[in-house]
Amino acid sequence: MRYIVNVGSVGDPRCADIRACYCVYDSDIKQVTYRRVPFDIEAYHADLEKSGLTIKPYFLLSILEEKQEDAPIQDWIVHTSLRPARKVAEPVMDFDIARKQAIRTAEEVAEETRKRREKEERLAEEAKAWMRRQRKEQLRKAIAAKAMIDLERKKKKEEEEAEIRRKLQLAHQAAEDARKLKEEQDAAEAKAKAEKLNLKKKQLQETIAAKTKAQQEIKKKKEEEKEDIRKKLQMLKQKTAKTKQTDSRNR
């Protein structure tokens, strides 16, 4: 990157300050510092008049157009719109003064540089302290967030364990109910089987009793028939005997 620096003017300014202007460039810190020194306008005007040039600088024309008649320039110049600095009519400083001023300017620049560096170091320390505070705050927030997450996980785990225990209890209760129902069903089936067996036994007994009774009745009937036959035979024998007796008598 390149920069174009306007180093100012001596005798032909384009601003409200008509003092001579120069600048000092500090290559170490890459800084341009503008300096202004008094400018002898009366001597400049006299030399310009002696030269015979008809062209005059803009700032001098402005001063001459608005200057009161017979008024010295150094007394009137403070009233002009250009507003130059005080002691504008002082002669240009010599080399020693300029060197001392340059040294003083360099010392001022060095002091400003030192102050700026101290300020930058202070700001850097403040920034580091702020960063440390931010890190501590972020760490505290991270620890708090982790603790909150751990608490939520623990709570969720406890809820899941409670849910598992509840489901196990429900499963055990369902198994117990199923066992009781199975026992009741087995008892009912056993009772039904016993009742059915008793019914079959009773039916069998009734069948046997009926069969026995029928056999007894058949036997009794047979005995009655035999007795009847025996009686008939006896009666037939008696009749035959009577017939034989009757036949014997008849003979």
Image (cartoon, rainbow, N blue to C red):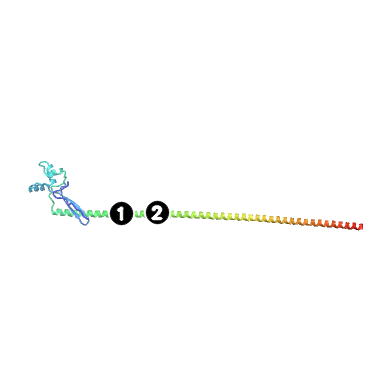
SS at badge 2: helix
What residue is shown with label 1? 127
**Residue at image location 15% in from the left, 53% down from the top:** 98
Of the 4 image quadrants, the one containing the C terminus is bottom right
**Residue at image location 12% in from the left, 42% down from the top:** 65
Q: Amino acid at mark 2?
A: Ala
Q: Amino acid at mark 1?
A: Ala
> Residue reaching furthest top?
69
Query: Mark 1 Cα within 10 Å, few/some/many (few <14, many 20+)?
Result: few
Of the 4 image quadrants, the one containing the N terminus is bottom left
Nearer to me, 33 or 4:
4
What residue is shown with label 2? 145
Question: Which mark sits nearer the N-terminus, 1 or 2?
Answer: 1
> Where in the figure is residue 69, as x and y percent of width and height?
10, 41
Gap in angstroms between the C-alphas marked 1 and 2: 26 Å
**Residue at image location 54% in from the left, 54% down from the top:** 174
Camera-near label (1 vs 2) is: 2
Nearer to me, 239 or 77:
239
SS at badge 1: helix
- Left/right of residue 103 with respect to residue 198 in the rendered view: left
Nearer to me, 122 or 180:
180
